[in-house]
Amino acid sequence: MQSHTGCHRAAPAAILRLATLAAVLLYALRVPVAIAAEVPLTLAEAKRRAVERSQSLTAQDAAISAAREMAVAAGQLPDPVLSVGIDNLPVDGPDAWSIGRDFMTMRKIGLMQEMTREEKRGLRAQRFEREAEKDRADKRVMIASIQRDTALAWLDRYYAEAMASVVADQQQQARLEIEAAESAYRAGRGGQADVYAARSALIALDDRASDLDRRVRNAKTMLGRWVGVAGDSPLAGEPSIDAIAVDPRTLDSDIEHHPEIAALARQVDVAVAEAKVAEANRTPDWSVQVTYSQRGSAYSNLVSFGVSVPLPWDRAHRQDREVAAKLAIADQARAQREDMLRAHTAELRAQIAEWENGRERRARYEQQMIPLARDRTAAALSAYRGGKASLADVLAARRNEIDVRMQALQLQADTARLWAQLNFLVPDDGIAHTAMSTTDSRKDLP
């Protein structure tokens, strides 16, 4: 009985040791996950993730593949046409419905092939090849757009969190000012109005913090739309926004490489290819037909040969009009490209001017306005402690400082957004090469 009782006493201890070991192992397994979750999300990594997980690019790959498949199909001859039938079957008299008694009745089987010219087939294939090239250009537009929108979402979250941090610091200072006002009131050195003023200042900061918290949550949601769960990860440091990839001196020539301009140029190529196909269609294609006819056993079987060709009897109102329509579409595509080229050039020059002005104003805030606001707050606080200023003066100086700091952050955020729009006019070379190679690896044109 004693040994049996000892076993019962040893069992809880063994279970406790196993539970402790399991907890240690579980903690060890969770630590790497927690560490990995705390890795800061850089702007470059956010762009890479957004391009990697984009379904729009997957859809564009399918469009490119479809155009290439059509290019192969368009270069082939049309399928031959098989015909089977009975000619000259009697319907009355002694030979009615008889297949073999009348010498004119015959069963026939024939094959017809349209002999589309090789030149025309080549033009049709080229039309779809130009379509594939346009789809590839559209894919570059998508990559640039994804990178730009991801960068904007990343920057929106970064500056929303920076503003929230400024307000959080001011909230801490406001709580200290409430304590100081209450202590002064109890000691008879201050009035109750100062206490109310300090509490009102904290409430205003709390309301501001609540609004910024909303902005941070929304910014995380928008960033998560591009990068997934990584959108909740902490962000790395602010990227340098003092340089852009656009050179104002060579803008007129560089804009030619803008993805949207390049896509419109490919659209012009498609329209020109369609006009060439329409021009080739003005000359009709011949069809060749062979028919074998079987008659009754008393008669000879027959073989027939034939050639047919369409007669463009109203070419001026049909084929010529189609060619004219295709040429007009090509002119339309050229005009749209030229108009977009001018619009983008003007827009970029305006954005460059705004970005340069934003950098100038940001420097003024950092070097002059923020230090002055900080000194004003320090002077008001020193005067209040020396009994030469009221708490209202301190609170006014504090409000002015936070307003100046928030204005500086908002200006910096606006300048950063302009930087992103200018810097991601074209896709990042490394990311774009990886994304484009997924399509090129499936290229199967002969």
Image (spheres, grey):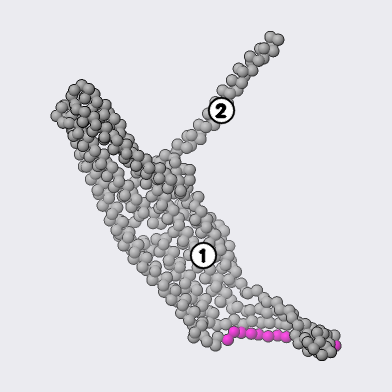
Q: Where is 392 relative to 225, above or below? A: above
- Which image quadrant: the N terminus? top right
Residue 176 quadrant: top left
Q: Kindly identify the residue that appears in the image at 31 percent across and 50 percent down.
A: 415
Binning the other alpha carbons within 10 Å of mark 2 as few (below 14), some (14 to 19) or many (20 upward) gives: few
Q: Is residue 238 above or below residue 247?
A: above
Q: What crowding class fits label 1: few (fewer than 14 Cα within 10 Å), some (14-19), or many (20 or more)?
A: many
- Whether 307 is among the magenta residues is yes
User: Residue 223 appears at what percent x and percent y?
Assistant: 43, 46
Provide the residue designation for mark 1. Answer: 132
Of the residues shown, which amino acid type is indicated by label 2?
Leu
Q: Which residue appears at 72% of the width and 80% of the height?
A: 110
Question: In what element is the residue under mark 1?
Answer: helix
Residue at disc 2, secondary structure: helix
Is residue 12 shown left or right of residue 172? right
Image coords of residue 337 (percent x, y): 39, 68
- Above or below for 27 versus 335: above
* Image-quadrant location for residue 90: bottom right
Label annotation for residue 380: none
Which picture quadrant has residue 364?
A: top left
CB-based contact (under 8 Å), mark 1 and mark 2: no
Which region is colored magenta? Answer: 298-311
Q: Dividing the image into 4 quarters, which one contains the C terminus?
A: bottom right
Residue at image mark 2: 25
First of labels 1, 2 by sequence position: 2
Q: Amino acid at mark 1?
A: Ala
In the rendered structure, the answer to whether residue 89 lies left or right of residue 354 reads right
Residue 256 on the magenta segment: no
